[in-house]
Every structure is written in C-alpha cells, then in structure tokens.
Image (cartoon, helix red, strand yellow):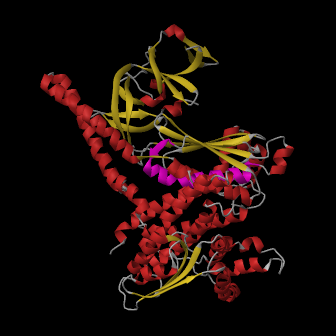
Amino acid sequence: MDLNQYLSMFIDESREHLQALNDNLLALEGSPEDISIVHNIFRSAHTLKGMSATMGFEDLASLTHEMENVLDLVRNDKLKMDAFIFDCIFKSLDALESMVENIIQGGTGKADVSDIVLSLKSIVTGDYLKAGAAAGAQSGTKDNNAAASSILDEFQLSIVQQSIEAGMQVFYIEVGVRQDCVLKAARAYMVFNVLEQNGEVIKSDPAVEDIEQERFDNNFSVFFVSSTDQESLQKQVANVSEIDKAIVTLLTLEKLEELMKPAIAAVAEVAAAAAPAVAPVPTAAAEIKKPVAAANAPVANRTIRVDIERLDALMNLFSELLIDRSRLEQLASEIKKNDLTETVEHMSRVSSDLQNIVLKLRMVPIDTVFNRFPRMIRDVAKNLDKKVDLIITGADTELDRTVVDEIGDPLVHLLRNAVDHGVEPTVDRIAAGKPETGMIYLRAFHSGNHVFIEIEEDGRGINRDAVLNAAIKKGVVTPEQASKLSDNEVYLLLFASGFSTADKISDISGRGVGLDVVKTKIESLGGRVQVESNFGKGTKFSVQLPLTLSIISAMLIRVGSEKYAIPLSSIVETSAIATDQILTVHGSRMVNFRSNVIPLVSLSKVFSVPNKNGTEVEKETQIVVIRKGEKLAALIVDEFIGQQEIVLKSLGKYFTNLFAISGATILGDGQVALIIDTNALIK
C-alpha cells in the first residue's frame, strides 16, 4: 500500500493534534484538577499515535504511546499532575513537533528520545517520586511493587492484590500461537474476544497495540479477572484455532509474589544499562478492537484539503467573471430589455453567493498563528523566571491564507522581545508598584481592507535616550539628526539592521535583535509596523497588513475626472455639507460631525487631481466619513457613483509605497479605478 498519497493529510492533521495537545496542556496547567481536559489530551495523543503507526513512523507512535500511559493514569485518578509531569509532557510535545518537522523536510521522523521515554516510564512506575529517597526507606512490599512494575505497575498490582483479597478469581494466562500461523494478530484478537466475554483484562504483555500489529514473537500473557472457573476458561482459550498453548494459572497472593520475583532482576538490569524498556500497555483489552484511524474518520469525511495554488487559480478566474458581470450589468441598463435585465439580475445573485464561497475558501482565522503563542510565552517566561499572562483577542479575524503563512515568524520576534525586554522581572515590577504578573495583549482586528495586529505589554517601556545613544554610537543617525526626531521616529530606529539596546545578548534577545527582520518581512507583505511607548508603563507594536488579493464591497466616487474606490468597511456614512460648516482650527480644516470635530481631507489635493482647465477641482459639498479604530475623518469628493463589488489587485512591484493607495480594480466599462487606503489618511 502506497502511503505517500496520505502524507500531506498526515502532516496537516498531526500539526492540528499537536496544537490541540499544547493548548489543552496549557489549560490543564491552569486547572490541574480538571479531568475533562485530560480526556481531551488523551484523545489527541491516542489519535496521533494511531496515525503515526499507520504511516510507519514508529518513533512518533512509541513516544506518543508513553505519553498515553501517563495520561491514562491521570484520567483514572491514579496519578496527580505536578511540575515534573508537566515538564516531561511538554518536552515530549517538543520532540514530537521536531519529528513531524523532520518528516515535512523529507526525513524519516526518527529521533533519539530515550531520555524522555525513561522520564515518562519513571512517572508510570512512580520511581520519579522515590528518586530522592534514602536507600532502604521503602518497605519490602513497596520494593516488590517497584520491582514488579516491569510486569505490573503499582496500580495494576494493587488491583490484582485487592481482587484476590476480595475473593475474586484472578488468572495469569500464557498463550502461544503456532509457529506456522499466518495471521497471528487475528488469532490474538479471537483470544481477547473470548476473555472479554468472561471478565476483564488488567494487563497484557506485550502491549495490545504491539499484538494488534503483530509486533510479538508467538507468545503473550494476560492478567485477567473473571468469575468463570479455571478449567472452562482454559478450554475456551485452547479452542481458538492455531493456538497451541493456553496455560491458565489461578493466582493467590503467594503465587503472585512468586511470579513477580523474576521481575526484580530484570528491572535492576534495565536500570543499570539505562536502556529503554518495552512500553507499558493500556489496561483494557477492548482497545485491540479499535481501528487506529477511527478517530480521524469524521474529520476526513467533512474536510477536503486543497492546494493553495488551486485556490489562487479559482480566485483569478472569478475575478475575471466579476469584471464581466459588471460589464453585463452596464450593458443591460443601456439596452433596457426585460429578459436581459432579469437574466443579468439572476446572474448577479448567483455570482454574489459564489463570491462569498470563493472568499471564504482563501480566508482563514488568524488563530492558526495565534494558538501557538501561549505555549511559547509560557516557556520563555519560565526560562526568564518571570510571570507573564498572554491575553488574546480577535483570534477569529480572518486573513488571506498566504499572509497568515508568512506572518508567524515576525510575531514570534515581537512577542519574545515583549517578554524578554518589555516585561520587567518580578522584583522590579513589585518595586515599581505593578502587579507581579506582567500582561501581554495580542489583538487582531479589521479596519478597512487591512488587518491590524497589536502586541502591547505593561512593562518598562522604551527608554528614548538609550535608543538615541545606541543609534548615534552605531552610526544609524548623527547627533544633529537625533535632535530633530520625534518619539515615534526614535522608536522606529529599533528596526535598523543590527540595532540593539540589550546589555547582553541572550538566546531570547534584547529589544532590537531581529526587529530588522520583522520590518523587512512585514514590508514584503505590503504592510507596515509602528511603535508607541510610554516609558515605565509599556509599549505597543502595531502591524498593519493588507488583504493582498480579495474581493471587497466598495463605494465608487469621482474626484475631478478620476474614479476611486473606498472600501465600505471603512466608511461610517456619506453626507453633504455647506461651505459655511467648514471650520479652521490651527490652520487645519475641520467639520462638525455628530458633536465631534473631525479633520476634513480634500482628495483632490491629496492626489493632485486637476480639472479640465488644469486647476484643482474642489467642490466642498459631498463628504465621506471614514474610520480607523476610534479615529474619524471626512473626505471631500465630487460625486458618488454607487456601491459595487470590486476585485482588489496589486499594482505590481513597480508601483510600491504609493501614499494612500492600496491597489486598483477594473470596472465594468474597462476603466481602472484606484482603491484608496483610508488608514493612511488618518494620523
């Protein structure tokens, strides 16, 4: 069976499950008593294990299985989460992510995780709790429990002992499959089916999953609790075809102790060699009946993963269709034939529905990027011995898939800098009268045809003088230039190549390290970044990203002889004003809008649009009120043409950094209209 065709699906779904594991583990760290979260973690781990085993990535499957053993004890109230267990599972997730990344790069997904495996095994056996205890402190019974853990862990052993003491029948069953058997796993399944009908399996050796995939020689053993008598049980197991050995031993406490003795030497030998042992197994034989991919089936039935290039092609084709639709609507209005008008109207309705679908196909919530940051913040803060809370809002804000794929790394730089250089150490925060836990706010929201991402923290803020001194020292600016810079211009010096204000460079970096990379990447996406800071109180980085290719609703307007489009999402309302309503405040023109005085911007002056006589056209009658966050402004236009769905297209690499222009669109009559970036018009 060729599994390569499923590799892309495996990678995508593995990423999703690893992200779910990280998210739920962080939630569990905040609420360690919430067993429902443990169940969610266990399900994700179990599914990931099955997927990995199916694809042949054994190291992935084995490590996930070890995690599963720990989680199984937790979800059954046999183990309490503590700092050591959290750290081990987080390390396991990091290793799993590295393995998946290796597979993405064309590797085999193999890795040396023996240290992590031993840590997880020590949790299952309880040995990690006894690591610091003096030799001989444990009683003989407890020593036996620890030693016996290579066969039964302490909880399974306790179940067996209590069952025997309660008068229940506990059997140790040794089963042998014939050497010439072709389907060993199938025969083993039939044995487990017989056992399930007569009682409950406590433990099997090897693991159920290993038996299921024929990873055993020809023998396996089972600890089994049943009310069926010994003779009947042995006969039923022996009657399974191609089984040549079925030894059923009724256990007493003495026989159990005798059975455990050989394990003492085995455990000592394994500990001395520090070699990974065979993984502990699930406690229920019912798991052998579960298809490994069953948990994925519903998702696979509802989801189709599509190559991004196909979506690009679909978007381009629909763009052409939209332009033709506009042309048809214009022709129908000129010809004025009922049949043609009705057909075009129906086409418009259908194409509008199609437009919504096409748009949603390319747009993805930005939480696909945001959801990896809580774990990162947790690790960085722990490494720096700081207390930091990350508050995320607007994670459902949608952005073009291509932009989402590229924006992750710049945000990582900004967030790591916020923890390292922004948020003060706990001692300094308390001394400054601040809460000991620093706050970092990660926000995303739409404004016009842009998405804004803000990273704000309540830390020490940016020291303006320190930035200027460092910039002068490195030759980024001269002392004369420095004296003329505004605060915002000084803060933007942080993005100069190689600039840093850190006293020493760490693996996390000081403010400035890597920020030139951030600026370069954001600008390559057609965006820009701004900085606001209040020394001693905090800093905010604001990243503005365009929707590079999209279909938007816009208001078409005329200024002089030129047509422009303003995105409807940035328009508050349109209105007409009289000339005497225009105010002049400190040399700037303003207008009274709903009890607020807002700036008045002449588009003819902004874009230098002349009339036919060569002079500027400015009829101060029609205005469009636009919004950027909480700020408003009014734009003077000559005429409102009407609302229309338009295709936003880039002007190409030769027309970059045009002021207040975000792109262009082709109208129904073939004319090109520039799309106004209203955010650039509001300071």
Q: Confirm whether the magenta stretch covers residue 314.
A: no
- x then y, percent, for residue 467: 74, 48
Our reading of the magenta stretch's main secondary structure is helix
Q: Is residue 485 above or below residue 123?
A: above
Residue depicted at x 55% and y 24%: 632
Camera-side residue: 541 or 306? Answer: 306
* Residue furthest to the right: 431
Q: Confirm whether the magenta stretch covers residue 416.
A: yes
Residue depicted at x 36% and y 71%: 4
Camera-side residue: 47 or 372? Answer: 47
Residue depicted at x 59% and y 68%: 67
- x then y, percent, for residue 582: 54, 12
The answer to whether residue 612 is seen in the rendering is no
The answer to whether residue 406 is seen in the rendering is yes
Horizontal side of 87 relative to 110 (left or right) equals right
Horizontal side of 293 relative to 26 (left or right) equals left
Camera-side residue: 162 or 13? Answer: 162
- x then y, percent, for residue 568: 42, 29
Question: How many numbered markers are drawn?
Answer: 0
- Tell me the quarter of the picture where residue 617 sits: top left
Horizontal side of 478 relative to 104 (left or right) equals right
Question: In the rendered view of the protein, which quadrant contains the N terminus?
Answer: bottom left
Question: Which residues, given as a range, are shown in magenta?
Answer: 396-423
Question: In the rendered view of the protein, which quadrant contains the C terminus?
Answer: top right
- x then y, percent, for residue 223: 56, 77
Camera-side residue: 159 or 8? Answer: 159
